[in-house]
Every structure is written in C-alpha cells, then in structure tokens.
Image: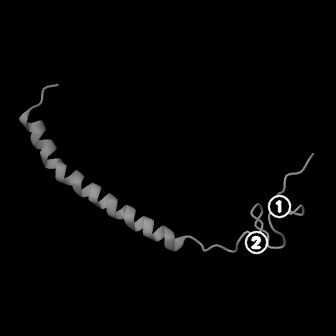
C-alpha cells in the first residue's frame, strides 16, 4: 500500500480526536472506580458471627448444622 499525503493528513487530523477520547476514557474509568467503592454494600459481619458458606447468623463456619456443608452421600 502506498502512503499518500492525503493519508498522512487524515491520520494527523484524527490524532487529537484519539487523544481526547483516550483522556475521556481514563477520566470515566476513575469516576467508575470511585463510584464502585461508594455503591458496594458494607460487610454484614465477620466469620465469628456468620457462616462463610451459607451466610446464616445462627452458626459459624465448619458447623455440621450448616446446610451448605459437604455431606457424604
């Protein structure tokens, strides 16, 4: 493919548009990252008060009463 002066001018004219789009995408990424921390729900307990497998508050992890505990069939 031969490179013409028109091709070079077209690329040179579009370069600032690409740079502006990259800057806008970076700004949007920072906004989304900041919003994710705000929108994420807070933790609802620790492993000493909740089961890590099923999330129930009436037993802790590794308790045989857990309905999500592995069973021998």
Residue plotted at (38% across, 61% down): 29
| Point 74% across, 63% down: residue | 52
Name the residue carrying label 1.
62
- Up-down: is 2 above or below 48? above
Residue at the spot 16% in from the left edge and 43% down from the top edge: 11
First-in-chain label (2 vs 1): 2
Whether 33 is drawn above or below 11: the answer is below
| Residue 58 in picture, x, y percent from top left | 84, 73
**Total tally of numbered discs in the picture:** 2
Residue 47 marker: none
Left or right of residue 58: residue 31: left
Screen quadrant of the C terminus: top right
Using the image as rendered, state which of residue 34 and residue 64 is in the foreground.
64
Q: Residue at x 61, y 74 (%)?
A: 42
Residue 23 appears at what percent x and percent y?
27, 59
* Quadrant (top left, top right, bottom left, bottom right) of the N terminus: top left
SS at mark 1 in the image: loop
Instruction: Answer few, some or many: residues within 10 Å of disc 1's Cα (few below 14, many 20 plus, some between 14 and 19).
Output: few
Can you identify the residue that label 2 sits on?
48
Which residue is most to the right? 73
* Mark 2 to mark 1 CA distance (whole Å): 11 Å
Is the image coloured rainbow, by chain, by secondary structure, or in one colour? Answer: one colour
Q: Give 9 or 48, whichever is nearer the viewer.
A: 48
- 36 to the left or right of 45: left
Q: Quadrant of residue 12?
A: top left
Residue 30 in the image, given as x and y percentages of width and height: 38, 65
Q: Quadrant of residue 9?
A: top left
What residue occupies the far left of the structure in this picture? 5
Q: Nearer the viewer, residue 68 or 18?
A: 68
What secondary structure is marked by label 2? loop
Tag 2 near tag 1, CB within 8 Å? no
Q: Position of residue 67 (x, y in %)?
A: 86, 60
């Amino acid at each position: 493919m031969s490179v013409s002066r028109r091709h070079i001018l077209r690329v040179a004219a579009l370069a600032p548009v690409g740079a502006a789009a990259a800057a806008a995408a970076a700004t949007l990424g920072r906004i989304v990252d900041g919003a994710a921390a705000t929108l994420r729900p807070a933790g609802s307990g620790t492993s000493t008060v909740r089961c890590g497998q099923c999330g129930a508050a009436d037993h802790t992890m590794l308790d045989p009463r857990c309905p999500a505990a592995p069973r021998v069939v």
